[in-house]
Image: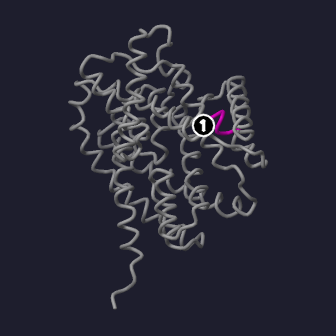
Amino acid sequence: MKAVTIAFVVAGIGVAVFLKLQLPLPWLLGPICACLLAALLRVPLAGVASVNDGMRTILGVAVGATLTPTVLASLPAMWPTLALVPVMIIAVGCVGVPYFQRLCGYDFPTAYYATMPGGLQDMILFGEEAGANPRTLSLIHATRVLVIVASLPFLMKGIWAADLTRAPGAPATSIPLIELGVMTVCAIVGWRLAKWAGMFGASILGPLIVAAVCAMTGLLHHRPPAEAIWAAQFFIGMGIGCKYAGVTLAEVRKDLVAGLGFCALLILLTVVFVEVIYNLGLASGMEALLAFAPGGQAELTVLALIVGADVAFVVAHHMLRIFMVILGAPVAAKLFNAPPPG
């Protein structure tokens, strides 16, 4: 409990510093940077998994509330860019596995599951079952999410002059109490039903589906208030930073450096795909970047909400990416690591 309290305090200091210095996304990047620095200084930190999942339900409701019949009718038009998602996954695999295996010296299971841009928990679970090093996977994927999430705001501000100071929603006082109640029911019921059904990303996708149904039937007309989305950013940022708790100098030298090198390769690949999509006129540059950047689904949903991007477009691509990686990773790993015939 002491480590959790310390994490709260450190994350709060990070928010205060970012607000004081007027840095972008203080409620997300402040906790990430402060907790990362504290973890590297060996300060004991810990998050609360159930609270983090609860905060993700807010993002699920926020996305679901935007899925009106008009928006859903536009989904089939996304097929050209959705078709590029598996191409992106294959490209990441072709670059990442040789990088981790030949250049960084990892065994194949660790190299493969460190490369696949799926959910952190899923990749660690599958990787451990395949004989990979779970600690290495945890650090590399945490680094992937951190670098992508921390770099995108500066890219969007520098290239597209994105407004990162806008509130992610209306104030709570302007939303009718009945709608706040509907959102709460969507979050809790959707999460529990999705978890019971064994759905991947249950804390986001369950509330998203229930909120979408409410939006299409006229029961929901607002997104969650700005205060709720700021709270979600705070806990998500704190959770990312806390994943570095207990990191050793040897792990910094090998795993974190390897993760940073892989992030550079991922950013280059993402830029290539964004350029292709933009030049073909399939999507705007900023929305293509948010849709194809291999960061965490929750974190990129937050960014899409803040900059006013097409949230349905961004979330659809990340859902497909994570779905394909989760379903395909164990099968592909067995195929590639299979012994030669005879």
* Closest to the observer, 335 or 191: 191
In the picture provided, is 121 more to the left or to the right than 248?
A: left
Decide: is 92 above or below 166. Answer: below
Residue ID at (46%, 64%): 95
- The image position of residue 110, as x and y in percent, is 53, 67
Residue 232 is drawn in which quadrant?
A: top right
In the picture provided, is 166 more to the left or to the right than 272?
A: right
Q: Amino acid at mark 1?
A: Gly
- The image position of residue 238, as x and y in percent, is 63, 37
In the picture provided, is 116 more to the left or to the right than 40?
A: left
* Closest to the observer, 268 or 55: 55
Task: Give the main secondary structure, helix, strand or loop, of the magenta stretch.
Answer: helix
Decide: is 78 above or below 73. Answer: below
Magenta span: 29-34
Residue ID at (51%, 58%): 124
Disc 1: CA contacts within 10 A as few (<14), some (14-19) or many (>=20) = many
Residue ID at (35%, 24%): 65
Whether the magenta-drawn stretch holds residue 257 is answered as no
Q: Quadrant of the N terminus?
A: top right
- The image position of residue 310, as x and y in percent, is 36, 30
Name the residue tied to disc 1. Answer: 237
